[in-house]
Image (cartoon, rainbow, N blue to C red):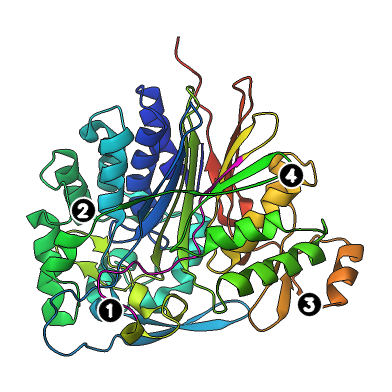
Amino acid sequence: MATGNAATTAAAVAILEHGGNAVDAAVAAGFASTVAEPGLTSLAAGGFAILRHPDGAVASLDFFTAVPGLLRRGPRPEPTTITVVYPSAQQDFRVGPAAAAVPGMLAGLLTLHAEHGSLPIATVVEPSVRLARAGAVIDSAQAYILTLIEAIVRHTSSAEAVYAPDGPLLAEGDVLRDPDLADFLSRVADGTVDSLTSPGFAEPLLAMHADGCQITETDLASYRPQHREPLVAARHGWTVVTNPPPAYGGEIIARAVSELDDYSYAGLTASLAAATAAVKGTLAATTGTTQISIVDAAGLVVSMTTTNGAGGGVLIPGTGIHLNNMLGEDDLLPAGLDAVTPGERLRSMSAPTILLAPDGTVTALGTGGSARIRTAVATVIVRLRDGGETLAEAIAGPRAHLEDSGVVQVEHGMSSESLAQLRQHYEVNEWDCTDFYFGGVNAVQRAPDGRVTAVADHRRNGTVAIVPVRG
């Protein structure tokens, strides 16, 4: 398995060692990630999962966030705008209760478990309960993310009490303590909370209507994770199975790698640009995203991507759950909130993917990284398929991302020849390092003989584990 955090990986390991399957482990990791990766995901987040069963059947579950406002009454309040400053750019986000979309994460994890899990839900959730009670150690990646979104997590006293309890923001090595989240997870484990309409989740969330939250009782009652046919694209005996519409990322990646004529950074950049223009002129993206990739001994494969956006800077009272800010991300609503319909899924660049090689090797991969998701996943695919690289080489290699401005951001380590080819067509900004900006591809690979390779991206401090088969 490969995930974005050591504690997230540990939760999945515990479940596999307990005899669970890959879905049990992915769900356990998903719950644990909401504790250990607070800058990226939450039980009020959204996500997607792609599954491949041992018999070769594939499936997709969409549990992304939805537009709220079904049976809404009264004027729509305006969220608060906060500017997040990145190393080479800045971006405005709208935060607060009014920026929250209908969350799908809790429903998605419970649905995945109910349909494909093998262990009791109490067993699957228990590692995250223990983690939340003990406190999650902030690693370097989470410390960096919290620094980026410091203005957001200080937006309300409820968030500040968790992320900056003694005044300074939590830093690497500090322990994040969220007893309300531990209590909430224990209620999921014992079945007291088993849906979005459970009083323990719905009542405190709906009470936030007084603070401007637009989510209604009807929104929660109407929300369902959606089963969709995965998008499948084949070329040269390789098959890409990825996230289907209404999300955009999978379609862009599938088009780009299927239509690639020139195996080079310049060729891939051009192919991604053409695919993006064909699918959507203005990219859909999410800021805080994490990836879980798991395969079990039987060959069940799970690739799951979840995201909380930049976070809303407010916790659902009494639950410790950080609200998303999906209505406050312009990339998700390029035509504005008035152009979408309550109940519709918001669009996303998230693209959990499974790659099938001609020899039967199966690779599950995905990444966070906002608009860079399409670049990171496509780059790893073509380095595996066309470059013949190992999984570790494909993930570690430098990346080049074409921004909407027309500038190609180039990671440190690219050859002078590749740089020269890019400069023939684009303005290039060469970085002197590898960076979080370029995504964090976490991937696991199973060979036809059952051997497993797991690789996590150093850019986001991902971790891996391989659990020996019992007996």
- Between 277 and 465, the residue placed more toward the observer is 277
Q: Secondary structure at mark 4?
A: helix
Question: Is 113 placed above or below 232 here?
Answer: above
**Range drawn in magenta:** 340-355
Looking at the figure, which quarter contains the C terminus?
A: top left
Question: Mark 2 Cα within 10 Å, few/some/many (few <14, many 20+)?
Answer: some
Instruction: Give the residue drawn at x 52%, y 33%.
Output: 465
Q: Is residue 80 left or right of residue 201?
A: right
Which residue position is annotated with label 2?
179
Q: Which of the two discs, 1 and 3, labels the residue nearer the N terminus?
A: 1
Question: Residue 196, percent across and down?
Answer: 17, 56
Q: Secondary structure at mark 3?
A: strand
Q: Comparing marks 2 and 1, which lies closer to the viewer?
A: 1
- Say if the magenta span includes residue 350: yes
Q: Which mark is residue 385?
A: 4
Which secondary structure dominates the residues rendered in magenta?
A: loop
CB-based contact (under 8 Å), mark 4 and mark 3 = no
Distance, label 2 to label 3, CA atoms, is: 47 Å
Distance, label 2 to label 1, CA atoms, is: 22 Å
Q: Which of the two discs, 2 and 1, labels the residue nearer the N terminus?
A: 1
Residue type (three-letter) at the residue carrying disc 1: Gly
Q: Which of the two discs, 2 and 3, labels the residue nearer the N terminus?
A: 2
Instruction: Give the residue drawn at x 26%, y 52%.
Output: 106
Which residue position is annotated with label 1?
96
Res. 411 in view:
no
Distance, label 4 to label 2, CA atoms, is: 46 Å
Question: Mark 4 Cα within 10 Å, few/some/many (few <14, many 20+)?
Answer: many
- Between 433 and 122, the residue placed more toward the observer is 122
